[in-house]
Image (spheres, helix red, strand yellow):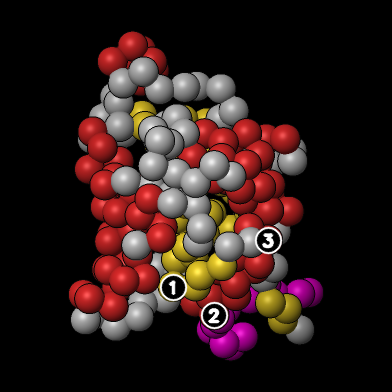
Amino acid sequence: MEKVAKSYLKYKICVSGAAKTECCAPEALEKAKEVGREIVRHNGVLMTGATTGIPYWAAIGAKEEGGISIGLSPAASEIAHVKSYRLPVDYFDMIIYTGFEYAGRNLLLTRSSDAVIIICGRMGTLNEFTIAFEDKKPIGILTGTGGMSDMIEEIVERAKRGSGKIVYDSDPKALIEKVLELVEEEKVVKIEKRPRINEE
């Protein structure tokens, strides 16, 4: 008799947002922290660009909830990460030093995630959004947080490239649940195609 192999993999959810938060709504940082908490509550691992601002607060939330926080740095080493880029090392379980600067880091970050959450944001966030959009990744937009997050719906409409796999919500919990529904739809595989374990 055969049984279907059980998956123990967690969801890898990227939080993308402004490192400098002057453009963000007053409650954006607290909402970012709550997004980090909700990712952990929903069996997720937080992925960020190992930077300040919105991603950093999401990392704080994830760690406060007892979860895992992984950062991808633009720097090639911890010394460069701290001294040259002036980026934090706390609230991360692991930092991967890509050495690919910001553009390369953004590509690796979005490609290695199951979904991307956009909170506030500036040009770098828009870059991560467009990579995720082109890769047909599930994307969640936390509305009402300022910056790019409140412009994306109009950008998508003006781009005339379809609506993408994007969901919008102003509530962190509701947004994570909507995004994970999209992730699950992506991962649906017929049972007969799954790896099987022989039972003796």
Label whose residue precedes the other's in the sequence (3 or 2)? 3
| 5 and 90: which is toward the camera | 90
User: Percent x, y for residue 90?
Assistant: 56, 22
Q: Residues within 10 Å of mark 1 (few under 14, many from 20)?
A: many
- Front label number (3 vs 2): 3
- The residue type indicated by label 3 comes to Lys
User: Percent x, y for residue 188?
Assistant: 56, 81
Label whose residue precedes the other's in the sequence (3 or 1)? 1
- The residue type indicated by label 1 comes to Ile
| 191 and 76: which is toward the camera | 76
Q: Is residue 91 magenta?
A: no
Region rendered in magenta = 187-200
Q: Residue at x 45, y 30 (%)?
A: 52
Apparent side of residue 11 relative to residue 107 in the rendered image (left or right): right
Where is mark 1, residue-wise? 166
User: Percent x, y for residue 107?
Assistant: 29, 50
Where is mark 3, residue-wise? 173
Determine whether the residue tagged by mark 2 lies in a helix, strand or loop: helix
Q: Residues within 10 Å of mark 2 (few under 14, many from 20)?
A: few
Determine whether the residue tagged by mark 3 lies in a helix, strand or loop: helix
- The residue type indicated by label 2 comes to Glu
User: Percent x, y for residue 76?
Assistant: 29, 24
Q: Residue at x 47, y 34 (%)?
A: 53
| 175 and 30: which is toward the camera | 30
Where is mark 2, residue-wise? 185
Determine whether the residue tagged by mark 1 lies in a helix, strand or loop: strand
What whole-number distance in Å separates the C-alpha atoms at marks 1 and 2? 13 Å
Give above or below for 94 relative to 120.
above
Would you identify the image quadrant in which residue 11 lies?
bottom right
Give above or below for 60 relative to 137.
above
